[in-house]
């Protein structure tokens, strides 16, 4: 839909009614201003509803990508509209959680519609002595397990790209694509005991 021209949209502020009384009965002046009303009506309608354009839950679908760019969010027009709206609305929150397990899981769910589980700490090390030598790096990597949640399948390339973008630079992230949710470890241990 284009907001540039909306056939039949009435103007809330007709110019012909604002002309001096001398032109109120002038046919040419009224027809001329009616043409301007047709051009300006979409502008006034947009300005009257401007606050709705900045709310991702109300913004027109064609405005959503632009709004996502404002907050550094990801918008994929191939996804369902409601999921796109939620991803844009929560983009700022996701930036605050960037580099955390929760942030990675939420981003994968919102942006790609997949469920995820993150294990491992990435081998982060630190020194308690100011100015001291940096401890040797730990070789552990982060394991990101992903499975379909809202989608029928998982696009592995997009998952890998998003994980690369969101994992902290100092960590190695491995990705496993699963056909469904992993079995709970307690359930696996219980079934091993019964066998």
Image (cartoon, helix red, strand yellow):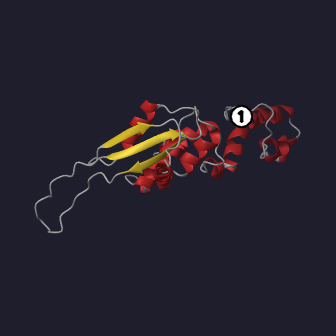
The image position of residue 118, as x and y in percent, is: 41, 49
Q: Taking 182 as reference, is 123 left or right?
A: left
Q: Circle 1 is placed at which residue position? A: 39
Q: Does the image show residue 95? A: no
Closest to the observer, 44 or 181: 181
The image position of residue 120, as x and y in percent, is: 34, 52
The image position of residue 88, as x and y in percent, is: 54, 47
The image position of residue 171, as x and y in percent, is: 28, 47
Element assignment for label 1: helix
Which of the 4 image quadrants contains residue 161? top left
Closest to the observer, 165 or 181: 181
Residue occupying the point 80% across, 39% down:
10
Up-down: is 53 above or below 151?
below
Residue occupying the point 81% across, 41% down:
16
Closest to the observer, 23 or 118: 118
Disc 1: CA contacts within 10 A as few (<14), some (14-19) or many (>=20): some
The residue lying furthest to the front in this view is 195
Q: Taking 71 as reference, is 136 left or right?
A: left
Up-down: is 194 above or below 6?
below
Residue occupying the point 77% across, 43% down:
15
- Quadrant (top left, top right, bottom left, bottom right) of the N terminus: top right
Q: Does the image show residue 25? A: yes
Closest to the observer, 134 or 41: 134
Residue occupying the point 89% across, 39% down:
25
């Amino acid at each position: 839909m284009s907001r540039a021209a909306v056939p039949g949209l009435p103007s809330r502020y007709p110019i012909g009614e604002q002309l001096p009384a001398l032109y109120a009965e002038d046919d040419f002046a009224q027809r001329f201003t009616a043409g301007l009303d047709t051009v300006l009506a979409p502008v006034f309608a947009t300005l009257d509803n401007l606050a709705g354009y900045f709310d991702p839950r109300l913004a027109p679908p064609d405005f959503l990508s632009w709004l996502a760019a404002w907050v550094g969010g990801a918008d994929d027009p191939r996804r369902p509209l409601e999921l796109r709206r939620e991803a844009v609305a929560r983009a700022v929150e996701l930036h605050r959680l960037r580099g955390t397990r929760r942030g990675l899981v939420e981003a994968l769910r919102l942006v790609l519609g997949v469920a995820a589980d993150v294990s491992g700490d990435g081998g982060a090390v630190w020194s308690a002595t100011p100015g001291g030598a940096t401890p040797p790096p730990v070789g552990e990597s982060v394991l990101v397990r992903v499975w379909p949640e809202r989608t029928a399948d998982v696009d592995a390339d997009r998952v890998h790209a998003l994980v690369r973008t969101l994992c902290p630079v100092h960590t190695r992230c491995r990705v496993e694509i699963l056909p469904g949710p992993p079995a709970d470890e307690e359930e696996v241990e219980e079934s091993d005991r019964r066998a």
